[in-house]
Each structure stands twice: as structure tokens, then as C-alpha cells.
Image (cartoon, helix red, strand yellow):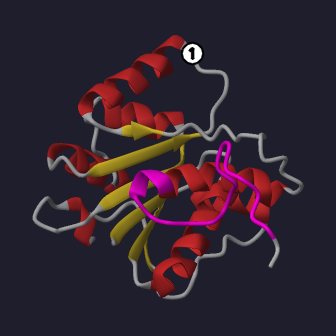
Amino acid sequence: MKLVVAITGASGSLYAQRLLQTLKETAAGTHEVHVALSTHAREVAHAEVGELTIPEGCQVHGDSSMQVPFVSGSAKFDAMIIVPCSMGTLGRIAHGYSDSAITRAADVFLKEKRKLILVPRETPWNLIQARNVVTLLEAGAEIIPAIPSFYHRPETVLDVIDTVVARILDHLGLDHALTKRWMEPEKSAE
């Protein structure tokens, strides 16, 4: 797949880092992954995880230049994931305010009817944020709030993170073995 993974300055950098790592590991790393970093993405990531780890082979872009391939509808990409997605970014996308490479790309993915997945981590939401989410759902975006599940009894922070990353991969149509699925029988040790 040809993907854009955008990382904004919202809390939740570990979700982005784990998604990138998993994409690199799936299908022997055959995905073409472009990473777009907002102005504050590295700053927040540094506070949360230290150095943001982006796997080798990913093409890294800033957010201030429109000289990137994914901001044009003529460039063929399969999907864009914004993880974590700040509510400011979500609101700008919902209202067509394409003032950066990330928001312009999201606008392009919506207009071209390409898969756009936003992963907000903010809680609680105010009414404006909830309405922005509804606007984006109506426009065709997929919203996967960074809300982990616990039925598989996670034992580590990474296990918890993987429940959200697994949902993102499911929505991309990519196979993975990150988490146990609901009511899935335990695999026997052979």
C-alpha cells in the first residue's frame, strides 16, 4: 500500500510510532510510507517517548511545504492516517481549512474519496469537537478514537497501544496478529 501517516502534536505519539513499526514489519515492509510531522509532533513525542522512532525507508516530510506528493489529487495514494490527531487538526479538516500539508492532504483524500482515518486521543470532547467529528464522518472520514480495549487482558502499555493500532490496521485491510480478537479461541501450543 501507498500510505501517508501524519503525526500531529496531540498526546499519543506511541500510537504513531507503533503503527509505523507494524507497517514496516507487515508484508515484509512492502508498503510505501510517507510520514508528515506537524510543527509540534516531535516536541510532544519527545515529552512522551523520548526520541520519536521512524523506521528506515519511510519518507519524512514537514508540514509547512506543499512540495510533497500527497497534497495533490493526481498523486495516487491508498490511505492517510492521522495518528494522533489533535482536535485542532480535526477541526481544520472538518471545515476545509487547508493551511498545512497535513490538512491539505486530508482535504484531498476526502475529495478523491480515498480512505482517511483520524485517530483523536483527546478526552473529554466539547460540543464543537463532537460536531466536527460528525461533519467528518458525514464527509467520508473514518474516526478511530484512541480508546483501547481490555478484553484480551493486556499486560503491558504496548499491549494496550496495540488494541488501537490493530483497529487502524483492520480499517486499512491489513492482516496482523497484534491482539486477540473477541471470542477468538486461544491458540494451542504445538
Quarter of the image for the N terminus: give it.
Answer: bottom left
Q: Is residue 176 magenta?
A: yes
What's the residue at 59%, 55% (across, down)?
A: 166
Residue 185 lies left or right of residue 4; in this view the side is right
What's the residue at 66%, 62% (across, down)?
A: 178
Residue 73 lies left or right of residue 124; in this view the side is left
The stretch of residues the image draws in magenta is 170-188
**Which residue type carries mark 1?**
Asn
Q: Nearer the viewer, residue 151 or 107?
A: 151
Identify whether 18 is placed above or below 13: below
Q: Secondary structure at mark 1?
A: loop
The residue sitting at the right extreme is 155
Identify whether 74 is placed above or below 92: below
Residue 37 visible in the current orientation: yes
The residue sitting at the left extreme is 74
Q: Point out residue 44 in the picture as x, y percentages from the top left corner.
A: 68, 54
Q: Nearer the viewer, residue 152 or 62?
A: 152
Q: Point out residue 180 in the picture as x, y percentages from the top left corner.
A: 69, 54
Q: Point out residue 114 in the picture as x, y percentages from the top left corner.
A: 23, 52
Residue 70 lies left or right of residue 119; in this view the side is left
| Residue for badge 1 | 126
Residue 44 visible in the current orientation: no
Q: How many marks?
A: 1
